[in-house]
Image: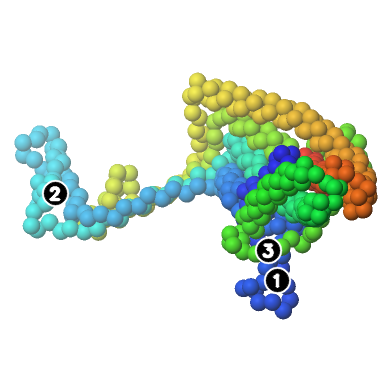
Amino acid sequence: MRTLNLVVWGAALAVAPAVVIAQPQGVAPSTAPVVLRLDALLARAAEAGGPIEAARAELAAYQATYDRAYWAWVPTLKVESILAPLPERRLLDECAFQDPTLTDGLLRVGPCPGARPADDERIDPDTEIGILTRTKATLTLPLYTFGKLEAGRRAAEGGVDVGRATVEATRGQLGLLVKQAWFGALMTAKALEIVEDGRSRLKTAKRQIEKELEAQSGRFTSNDLRKMVVQEADIEAKYLELQQLGARAHAGLRLAAGLPTDAAFSLSDDDLPDVAITENTLDGWLNVAAERRADVRLADAGLRARQGQVDLATAEFFPDIALVAAFGYAKGTTAQDNPDPFANDQYNFLSWGFVVGAEWKLDFAGRIGKLREAEANLAKVRAQRDALRQKIQLEVSEELGTVNRYVGEVAARKQAMKASKAWMTSNAMNFGMGLATTDELLSSLVSSSTSRLNYLRALYELNLAVARLENAVGVPIKR
């Protein structure tokens, strides 16, 4: 049963939490076992769970970057405002008056009579304290950026496409894990039935031998009984192994459904389906994969994003031209307003205006390095995309070959199962009538159980291969 062990091991893989429950009618929800359906589990796995949430969070980050790039053309408004205490500020009035020390009738200019300049330089108990409010606003509207806005938007759009493709790729991987757990659980259950049937038949034959030995009919010897004991131990070991694998498979499904560890459940299906796929050539499936596979779209989106970054780094060599509007206002309640319109008054003013300006950062060394880095990242993504296409060609070819192999093997194993069943039935009847030996009965019993298990394993592998091929081409392929 080593092969079966490896096959069923995939059923216990941890998958994203997903619960799909159908309650039988007329039974209380608290006591009724839940019924799990594959299609509903797949739907829940595509919408819930840590990996999906992480991919969606990454998509949200890409979307935020795109929104920022899309609205980059919107004017930016910068406002600076202060509110502070202001000691009184008086204008130093200048007066012209006659000075006897001057000749030729010249006038002297100086502080007006009564003005005290020294008092305006210090704060004393008589100084009045007021409030100064000052606000400056600058509105900048980009006029021409030499392609920076467009390149940034293209790079951000590629990032959004990367996020969407990542979500789809994550859904595909989770769906494959759910199918592995589902098919593994179905196969384990049927394998247990096969081994239980073989164990029951072997016990019946063993009891018959024991009766014949007790009656000393001479038909069997003690070696015949020993052969039965040895074979019975092998079957019992395989039965215990399958029980453990079944428990692992059920634990995986509970984890997939988000059920408690002790919750009872059943599967909506009893048998593994004998699947058939849509007929298509290898080139046809490759064309489908190139259009529909999530990681191909992810690689193409990454290439577009990197190309946008190269265009942005190139545009950074050129200046930004913008329309700048400015507004300023200040009012000091204890500052005397200067009537001179050309005076530099920092306490009382109202100003506005607009200009067309350019900002050009001449850091060519740094910008050349940034451009080369963007070009290197673009070349890396392009090489990764080409490698991905080669990988997909090999993967689709391998999975299609695997599907075709197991289609043929399932048909052959089915014929062998029918033949071994007829052989075992004939030997069992002959053994009861004394026409078959113990070795013949054991050989037919082992052959029947083995052929049924081999058919079951091939059917499981076919279902899993079809699931992998669907994941490889990005579309459902079952007929």
Quote the CA–CA distance across marks 2 and 3. Answer: 91 Å
Inspect this view and state whether residue 299 appears. yes
Q: Rate crowding at label 2 as few (under 14), some (14 to 19) or many (20 or more) other CA atoms within 10 Å.
A: some
Q: Determine which residue is flagged by label 2.
A: 120
Tag 1–tag 3 contact (CB < 8 Å): no
Mark carried by residue 319: none
Q: In front here: 151 or 40?
A: 40
In the picture, residue 193 is in which quadrant?
bottom right
Type of amino acid under label 3: Phe
The percent coordinates of residue 336 (x first, y second) are 23, 54
Residue at image point 50% right, 33% down: 359
Residue at image point 66% right, 41% down: 162
Does residue 310 lie above or below 160 as drawn? above
**Mark closer to the chain start, 1 or 3:** 1
Type of amino acid under label 1: Gln
Quote the CA–CA distance across marks 2 and 1. Answer: 89 Å
Quote the CA–CA distance across marks 1 and 3. Answer: 10 Å
Residue at image point 11% right, 43% down: 98
Does residue 371 lie above or below 45 as drawn? above
Which mark's residue is nearer the viewer, 2 or 3? Answer: 3
Disc 1, SS = loop
Inspect this view and state whether residue 292 appears. no
Q: Determine which residue is flagged by label 1.
A: 23
The percent coordinates of residue 81 (x first, y second) are 35, 52
Mark carried by residue 265: 3
Residue at image point 85% right, 47% down: 218
